[in-house]
Amino acid sequence: MNYENGMKVSSFLKSQPRAKPIGIGDFAKALERPWRYSLSSIGSSTRTLGLAISGGVDSMALAVLCSRLQSAPVPFSEEVETAGNFKSHVFRHLPIIDFKAFVVDHGVRIGSGEEAKWVAAILNSKGISTRVLKIDWHDLTDPVSRPNFETLARTRRWQLLGKACKSRDIRSLLLAHHQDDQVETILMRMSKGQKNSGLAGIKAEGGIPECYGIHGLHESGHFDLPQTSKSDEPGDLEPSEPPQILSESGGIRVYRPLLDFDKDRLIATCQAHGMKWFEDPTNKDPSLTTRNTIRHIYKTHKLPVALSKPFLLKLSERCRQNVAARHELAESLLSKCEVSNFDKRFGTLQVRFPRLENISSREAAEVIRRIMILVTPEEHVPTPSLSTMIQRIFPDSQNQAPRQPKSFTVAGVLFQPLLADSEHEEYSPYDKSTPPKWLLSRQLHYNSKLKPAITFPPRNPRSPAWSNWQLWDGRYWFRVQNNHPLPVTVRTFGQGDMRSFSNDKSTSGLKSQFRRFAPGKIRYTLPCLVIPKETISKGLGDTVVALPTLDISNKYLQDHVKWEVRYKKVYWDGLPDPVST
């Protein structure tokens, strides 16, 4: 150990056996997936990946490997399958990659700012442009004393990293989790009684956490996405069918390229390349966190074979294989679903589930979940929450005779059986020989206090013309250019809003659209842009500005309020191409 500027710094550990440093070829191979995800950004031969650096040996090993890779393309070996099922190795190259690092200063411990600057200086000296990000706690008094401080810090840290990536057009963020972290995580989850997929451990990649509803961070913001229909030249309602709106794409993803390497190899990598790192003494205090306790037990006790590192890693691998097998089975089952009339304007789709026999309830629930996420307003739909719905959709899988299907709701989605392929209003007697077709839509909002609403204030002359994108009801992204003197609000369409379409052509056209695409009460789940009555005059109803997803605007307000709308990111993997009828 040595000290620089009063901080404890390590450049070697005499007590550690010298392991093999990570080869640059192996590291380059681990980076292929995050590099490929970044391909859909700017049309350039150089891709920028972000690094989340704490200053510990793990992240500094990641940094030094990226530093070596940054200067020139590096070949790596990849096993491929050729004709006749023979396998051979080919050498491939990653193009030049640019790395930008971020060091988060939590700002709650004396000296944390100096430590962050020290880490940034080291990375800059290695050719990696680095920025220190400081968490802002001005809205809280003594945040460390709060019982949920760790949760607060985690949320603010991730959002700070996400916004920093977005500002630099970075779509892939690398983290330094390694094999030892994986073992500790599995043991922690075992102690909490988790099973199956929970014991698969840390995922190698995923969406950025704690950023739901932030445009450009969570499953949105792909900057080359074409513009959707907007209100630049709106008119009164025409009977013709409005155009479909486009979906969001993109978002920031996190990758963990070091999960296959243990900590000894990370230490050896830093030592081999003269990379110093910072030792945080709190990581060695077993009384602070569960992870610290487990780490201490591993170092000071001889554990049973069933809790040994090799055994837990094999367990994790088996669980990952099981998860992959279930995913593959779900894809196969999804391909048998008949999906039709997926309409993003109304947030609806129709689906006929196949007859399924000899499948587990977990597999059946996964098929339902994958269909539901296309229209649900919820961020997540856990498969256990669907257990009571399985027998309604797959009676065969529960060894039950088919019954007359009935409507039900789950996770904000209304399932309605359609017993005919004709108009929604024309139902036929139930045919037990054919699985029913279901109409899926957003569940009605029965509690007025819980109805989703976003308000956009009048534009400040010094602010940008357009507002920030905001997520409404977990389904639609909106931004507004409000040049009206009053605020405008996005809320659900209501029964009284029809009077805003005064002329016969508008009213008849809208009713026709509703009968065809939004039967029953589905129309009352549509987003509606209004000037609230509280801002106009008591006794008057809200003034409807637009039905954005239908590209319908109030012609008297079209010069004052403009809007853009996009549907949430759609995951269609494994599903057959939708059919329009």
Image (cartoon, rainbow, N blue to C red):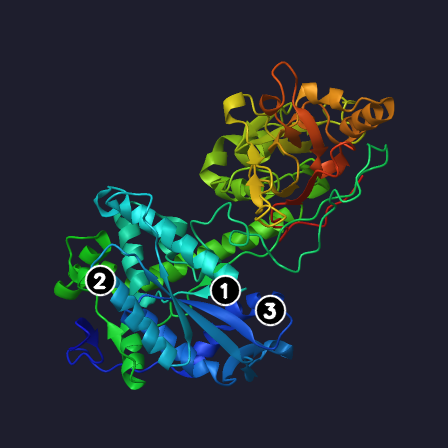
38 and 23: which one is in front? 38
Residues at marks 3 and 2 touching, judged by CB atoms closer than 8 Å: no
First along the sequence among labels 3 and 2? 3
Q: Which mark is residue 39?
A: 3
List x then y, in percent, for residue 479. 62, 44
Task: Say above or below: 203 vs 407.
Answer: below
Residue displayed at 61% across by 39% down: 375
Residue situated furthest top in the rendering: 539
Upstream in sequence: badge 2 or badge 1? 1
Residue at the front extreme, as displayed? 461
Q: Nearer the viewer, mark 2 or mark 1?
A: 1
Going 26% across and 74% down the picture, which residue do you hit? 277
SS at badge 2: helix
Q: Mark 3: which amino acid?
A: Leu
Q: Is residue 374 left or right of residue 434?
A: left
Mark 2 nearby-residue class (10 Å; few <14, some 14–19, many ≥20): few
Question: Which residue is disc 2 drawn over?
Answer: 305
Query: Mark 1 sits on what residue?
Result: 172
Q: Secondary structure at mark 1?
A: strand
Instruction: Inspect the image, locate mark 1, and give the three-letter code of the amino acid beneath it.
Output: Ser
Using the numbered discs, state the Cα–Cα distance from disc 3 to disc 2 in whole angstroms: 44 Å
Location of residue 193 in the rendering, given as x and y in whole percent from the top left corner: 29, 45
Which quadrant is the N terminus positioned in?
A: bottom left
Residue mark closest to the camera, 3 vs 2: 3
Check disc 1: other Cα within 10 Å, few if <14, some if 14-19, many if 20+: many
